Image (cartoon, helix red, strand yellow):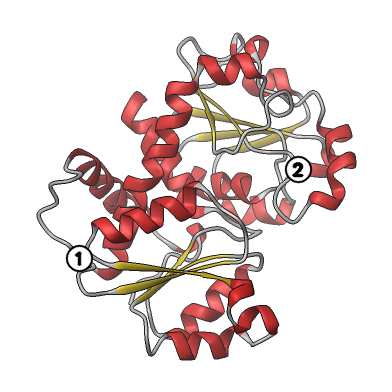
Amino acid sequence: MKHLLSLEKLPRADFEKILRAAAVFKRERGHHKTQPLAGQTWALMFSKSSTRTRVSFEVGIHELGGRPMFLNANDIQLGRGEPIKDTARVLGRMIHGAVIRTFAQSDVEEFARFSGVPTINALTDDEHPCQIIADIFTFQEKRGPIAGKTVAFIGDGACNVANSWIWMAAKFGFELRIAAPKKFQPSAALLKRAGGKISVSNDIQATAKGADLLYTDVWISMGKEAEAKERIKILTGYQINQSLVNLAKPGALVMHCLPAYRGKEIDDATLEANADTIFEEAENRLHVQKAILNWVVS
């Protein structure tokens, strides 16, 4: 049985299968030759709010022939303290697969272990695997293989999105530069485990210079709202704007996983100048989610 729980644990060959399938699903949308989820019901268990992840998975499951069932954690017994392993053993007898968006990485892994159904990590505090697969798909669709290219991540370098880029750097052979204040830099232990060509500094200009891709995420991730004032104070200045874009390679892409807080991690003018890329990146979540769903049941 296949799961997508962590980018760390999958070989590049599996990611390549997903990326190839995503291209086919995008090209053949509305004319799929097979419906791999026909007759299946998939639970979407979300403890964190969502737009792109929820909609892309609900639409994707439907278009692959399945029935999505959205379960807010507060609407089921998880919200009253039922252990995740008990919920998993109940749902595993009724559903065919689960997509989980929650706080603890251990919850997704425990659900997979006890449910006996394919399980997909739709975001935890540690990783956002589906997002980064879609990001790589988007880059390669527009610029060719990401191997040998330079990705510059600007902002909170210790968030789940940055972590996910870290895991993919070695697997796909690209250089990853992270510009973040000391407090928001990834741990040395994570960098050592991941390997690859990764550099971390607080020098935003040096990080952006000659990059093929400038990437950012929100400064205040879900669950960090209590730290908002401190985070804004420390991260102010770690913004993608036109002066930073000018330092990157000519034709460099600018991407954001959304939602964007204009005037903070990216300014309004730069987002609008790169809106075609950023919103196609969002659309590609659908095609990649379908490819992931197809992969876990194949």
Residue at mark 2: 185
Q: Where does the image place residue 12, in percent across and percent down from the top left?
A: 37, 52
Label whose residue precedes the other's in the sequence (1 or 2): 1
Quadrant location, the C terminus:
bottom left
Disc 1 to disc 2: CB gap under 8 Å: no
Front label number (1 vs 2)? 1
- Type of amino acid under label 1: Pro
Q: Is residue 276 visible?
A: yes
Is residue 104 toward the left or the right of residue 1 in the image?
Answer: right
Q: In the structure shown, which secondary structural element does the residue marked by tag 2 occupy?
A: loop
18 shown above or below 241: below
Residue in view at x 74 percent, y 51 percent: 187
Q: Where does the image place residue 53, in percent across and percent down from the top left?
A: 48, 52
Is residue 4 toward the left or the right of residue 265 in the image?
Answer: left
Is residue 64 toward the left or the right of residue 126 in the image?
Answer: left
Residue at mark 1: 36
- Type of amino acid under label 2: Gln
23 shown above or below 265: below
Q: Where does the image place residue 231, in percent across and percent down from the top left?
A: 84, 40
128 or 227: nearer the eye? 227
Residue in view at x 31 percent, y 54 percent: 290
Is residue 71 toward the left or the right of residue 226 in the image?
Answer: left
Single out the residue that lies furthest toward the left: 33
